[in-house]
Image (tube, rainbow, N blue to C red):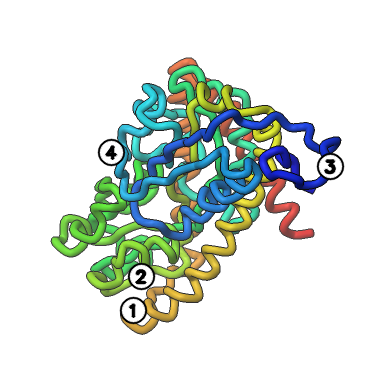
Amino acid sequence: MRRGSTFVAGFFAVALCTAPAIAQTTVWNFNIFGPPRAVTAGIEAMAEFYKKESGGKFEIKIAYGAALGPERQAPEAIKSGGYEGGLLCAGYYPNKFPLMTVMELPFLAPRGLEANAKVNEAVQAHPAIIEEMAKRWNIKYFSPIVLPAYEFMGNKRIASVADLKGVKMRISGLNAKALQTFGAVPTMVTAPESYQALERGTIDSFGFPYSYSFGAYKLYEVAKYVTDGMAMSGFMCWYGVSLDVWSKLPDDLKAKLPHAQALALDALIKAYQKEDDKWIPIFREKLEITPFPEAERDKLMKASEPIWQAWAKEQDAAGRPGTKILEFVQAEVAKSKTATKK
């Protein structure tokens, strides 16, 4: 039985109408870079849920294509009130959410979506992470994003760590360090710049969540190869909202947030599966699918462990609880693996 029934005349009895109505329509503008795609399915589901629960009095209005401002300036825009919320990715600005980048450490996060989602949620609920968003940026975590493991699509064949040497690869800083160990040349460009960069040869190979991002940005049109089995960690992304506007939301709608987040996660996972069903057959037809053997992936994992420790020491030196956060995430990852085996 839904609350918020005061917004619909005659719906159930007056005795059940315990939630205060919003006096006028509240609109939150959300800025999202790129087109509608699988990763936007979660926030779209939340927007639909809240509009229905509020009887149309609370609307999350989504602006695609970074229509409200550049993606790299999203934290500043939300803090200043340029818009109420939006898509945030720590890798686009690692110095703005330094502790959050723990989830971008190479090969640390679980491969599976459900397991990764549980670790992500635990990280978002950690007091140090909450403080990092709130104290500097006046931002609250609002809606989940869990990304599939990353593969690489481009015009260089990558079937081993030896093949990484000299390849210009699009991947974020912390993941990039593992690839650099084997001679890769990381270069960071945003997702909307991907097609042109690959077409012109500015980038040889793009790291993206497999498979939906490659389809959404049509990279298969200007690529020859895609890896299968690298399963690398990628960006840590989420939807954040201004604490100021959150504080003004009626308590009954605030209380619905956990349910809305669960709906968002379910929508994400279903959207990814739908996109896999659509795009993987197209990739098989148009590209060479290049297996990346488990033994080669193990070499990348081994090279990544010192990167984890270096990250923690760097955070500690800056007065942040890097070691504690890393140990927390490692414990959550271990829990997820244990749960998967049961």
Question: Which of labels 2 and 3 is toward the front?
Answer: 3
17 vs 286, left or right, is right
Residue bearing mark 4 = 70
Question: Which of labels 3 and 4 is toward the front?
Answer: 3
Q: Amino acid at mark 2?
A: Val
Which residue: 69% across, 53% down? Answer: 337
Report the quarter where the C terminus lies.
bottom right
Do the residues bearing badges 1 and 2 touch, measured as CB atoms within 8 Å?
yes
Residue bearing mark 3 = 13
Which residue: 44% across, 28% down? Answer: 98
Residue 39 at x, y = what percent?
47, 54
Which residue: 55% across, 57% down? Answer: 268
Classify mark 1: helix, strand or loop.
strand
Residue bearing mark 1 = 288
- Decide which of tag 3 and tag 1 comes sooner along the chain: 3
Question: Which of labels 1 and 4 is toward the front?
Answer: 4
Residue bearing mark 2 = 226
Residue 60 at x, y = what percent?
49, 42
Dot 1 crowding, Cα within 10 Å, few <14, some 14–19, many 20+: some
Q: CA distance from mark 3 to mark 4?
A: 47 Å
Dot 2 crowding, Cα within 10 Å, few <14, some 14–19, many 20+: many
- Decide which of tag 3 and tag 4 comes sooner along the chain: 3
- The answer to whether residue 181 is visible is no
